[in-house]
Amino acid sequence: MAENIQHPWLNLRLETERLILRPVQTGDTAAVFAMGSDPEVTRYGSELPWTDTAQADARIVRSIHAVTSGEYLPLVIERREDGAVIGECGLYQWSLQNRRAELGYRMNRAFWGKAYMREALTALLDWAFTREGLHRIEADTDPGNARSILLLNMLGFTQEGLLRERWIVGDQIFDTAMFGLLARDWTETRRNHASAKSLPGEAG
């Protein structure tokens, strides 16, 4: 019967050298709340820092429903060595007709500066373009979020515009820098990355 059919995303598991990407689970509350309640992590986000774990629980319930229905794909990032949930990433605003989705991500501040997010997003983008057949992935970030912009540039995204005063968070209004990545851009980024790693003296 149709109600017993599970969406393939429920069993999604992307593995890299150091990380595992999987759908969020009810047991992830503490890790999700740690990120959502940290003013530094949420500084450039679309909502104020959380103040109650119930907010994390509600987010997880919505995320599980989204994966189950195939509406969008929120994932957590686990560290392979100890199973710690250190970040979140995902693909949102799916448009099947246009083969397009929007990238989102954040990481626990204790794990910044270790290239974990670049590793995680590389795996996610590989899967999205090769397995899901996406043609375009978008991302938006605050123009002042230098870390995020650097990461997007490293992944091959191109800034395509600036939307003025797009977000209102609390009593503050923020602009948005819009970025786009096409499947052919990603192929070129991966090719360049492979070439750079093969240069003399650059291995490892």
Image (cartoon, grey):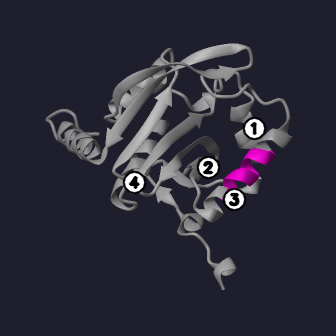
Q: Of the residues under marks 2 and 1, which one precedes in the sequence?
A: 1
Q: Which residue is label 2 attached to?
A: 82
Q: Of the residues under marks 3 and 4, which one precedes in the sequence?
A: 3
Residue 160 appears at what percent x and percent y? 35, 27
Q: Which residue is label 4 attached to?
A: 99
Quarter of the rendering occupied by the N terminus: bottom right
Q: Of the residues under marks 1 and 4, which one precedes in the sequence?
A: 1
Q: Nearer the viewer, mark 1 or mark 3?
A: 3
Residue extending furthest toward the bottom: 1
Residue 108 appears at what percent x and percent y? 63, 33
Q: Which residue is label 1 attached to?
A: 33
Q: Nearer the viewer, mark 2 or mark 3?
A: 3
Residue 26 or residue 113, whichever sits in front: 26
Q: SS at mark 3?
A: helix
- Identify the residue at horizontal 29%, vertical 44% (top origin): 186
Q: Nearer the viewer, mark 1 or mark 4?
A: 4
Q: CA distance from mark 2 to mark 1?
A: 19 Å
Q: Is residue 189 above or below residue 166?
A: below
CB under 8 Å between discs 1 and 4: no
Q: Which residue is label 3 attached to?
A: 65
Q: CA distance from mark 4 to mark 2?
A: 35 Å
Res 198 quadrant in image: top left
Res 193 quadrant in image: top left
Under mark 1, the amino acid is Phe
- Identify the residue at horizontal 48%, vertical 57% (top origin): 14
Q: Label 4: how many residues lie within 10 Å, few (<14), some (14-19) or many (20+)?
A: some
Task: Locate residue 192 relative to residue 39 in the image: left or right.
Answer: left
